[in-house]
Structure formats: structure tokens, C-alpha cells
Image (cartoon, grey):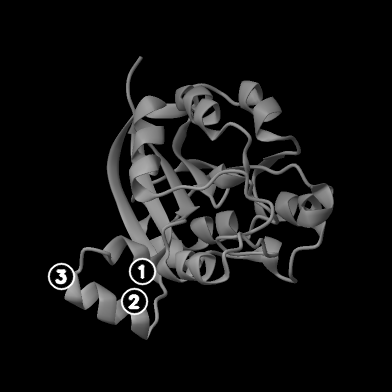
Amino acid sequence: MEEDYLNKPEGYYSLERNNLFPYIPKNLERVLDVGCSEGYFGRKLKEVNGVKEVWGIEPFDSAIPKATENLDKVLHEKIEIAIPQLPDNYFDCIFFNDVLEHLVDPYSILEQIRSKCKPEGWVFASIPNILNFETLYLFLKNKDWQYKDFGIMDRTHLRFFTKKSIHRMFTEAGYEVDSITGINEFCGKKFKILNFFLFNMLDEMKYIQMVVKARPLKK
């Protein structure tokens, strides 16, 4: 499994994730980026959104030198080990950008990390949408669940989500879901024709990812 992470395409760990910025909550001062990679997303939060302090959690050695340059503090640990080291009621927002699907138990991680958010804070996540039409079409056409180096069928994904299961996961972990928005629209002519004749009932299937914003409920 670790070799699969090390063999990612060039630039995989240096993404700024520009597509997420329109959905990020405003007026953030202290944030945590779980799975921060080389820290370029966190650095851009400081440059563009005026965030004053960015922490990161990153388990892979190769990303740490750049991450420590870009962020204020980096915990070189797996998330399960890092959570107890985080201060309580400290962060305005905790980011899980394409991370939860890589975890063995994302449900318990969301539950455990709730206390690290300020009471009025946010948890923000981008999560691949397994209901994407192109993904399901290839599955039905080829009758093959074929993993790849990146994307929805990334071979390092341990969990798969739909909009409905994302909402359930956050709700059961003790959050109030503010919004779940589809992003990165990708669908071909076949889908558009089918969706038209079904009165847009398949709209959720045109998105590659879902962006969720949720607030931790008070214990």
C-alpha cells in the first residue's frame, strides 16, 4: 500500500486545489489541513484568504521538508496518532481534502477530531463521488472494478461515498451538515441525453467530487 502512495504522478502532492476555494468558509484565522502533503494548499490559504496560522498533518516523509516551509506547524504522523497532540477548541476550520476515503475508519476520525474545532468552527472536506456517471458506465460496460493511480478509482482508496452516505457519516459523527455541493463536472453526451429524458434526476452523477461543510455539534 505505501508503494502505491509513493508512485503517484508528478505534482500529486503539490496541488493548491484551486477548485475548492469558492466553497471555503470566510474569516478563518487558525486552520488544520489533514493530509497536507507539501503544504501548498495551506500556503495559499494564507496568501489568498488571509489565514494567520495553518497546521498540517502528513504521514509521508517525502512531503515533510516542503510542508514545514509552507506551514506554521506540521505533525509528521498518521492522523490516528496526531489527533491527541492537537489543542482542543483551537481551529476555525479543519480540512480533509481527498483524505477521508483513504482512511480505514473515517467515521471515528471525524468523531475524535470534533473537539479540536472551535464551537463555531467548521469541518470542510472534498470527497470523490462514486456515483459519477462515467465511473459507473465503465463498470457496467467492462464488468470490471479497475483501480488506477489517481481519480475516483484511485487504488489507495479504502472507502467509497455518495452524497447520501457523506451526509450520514457526518451526521452520525456528531455534525450538522451545512451543505454538500457537487464539483468538477464531468459527463459525456450519453449522460446528458439520458439525464434530459429523466428530467435531470441524475444530476448528482455528473460530479467527480462532493464538497461538504459541517459544524461540530456541542457535546
Residue for point 51% across, 21% down:
88
Residue 25, above or below 111: below
- Which residue ends up furthest to the left in the rendered image? 199
Q: Which label sits on residue 206? A: 1
Q: Residues within 10 Å of mark 2 (few under 14, many from 20)?
A: some
For mark 3, give the secondary structure. loop
Q: Left of 78 or right of it: where is 217?
A: left
Circle nearer the N terminus (2, 1): 2
Residues 188 and 123: in front is 188
Q: Which tag is nearer the camera, tag 2 or tag 1?
A: 2
Label 2 – label 1 distance at C-alpha? 8 Å
Label 3 – label 2 distance at C-alpha? 12 Å
Q: Which label sits on residue 199? A: 3
Residue for point 42% across, 74% down:
186
What residue is shown with label 2?
Answer: 191
Circles 3 and 1: CB distance less than 8 Å? no
Circle nearer the N terminus (3, 1): 3
Q: Residues within 10 Å of mark 1 (few under 14, many from 20)?
A: many
Amino acid type, residue under disc 1 in the picture = Lys
Q: Residues within 10 Å of mark 3 (few under 14, many from 20)?
A: few
On the image, the x and y values in percent for residue 174 come to 37, 24
Residues 218 and 197: in front is 197
- Which residue ends up furthest to the top in the rendered image? 219
Residue for point 48% across, 52% down:
127
Label 3 – label 1 distance at C-alpha? 14 Å
Amino acid type, residue under disc 3 in the picture = Phe
Circle nearer the N terminus (3, 2): 2
Residues 47 and 195: in front is 195
Amino acid type, residue under disc 2 in the picture = Phe
Q: Left of 149 or right of it: where is 112?
A: left
On the image, the x and y values in percent for residue 208 come to 45, 64
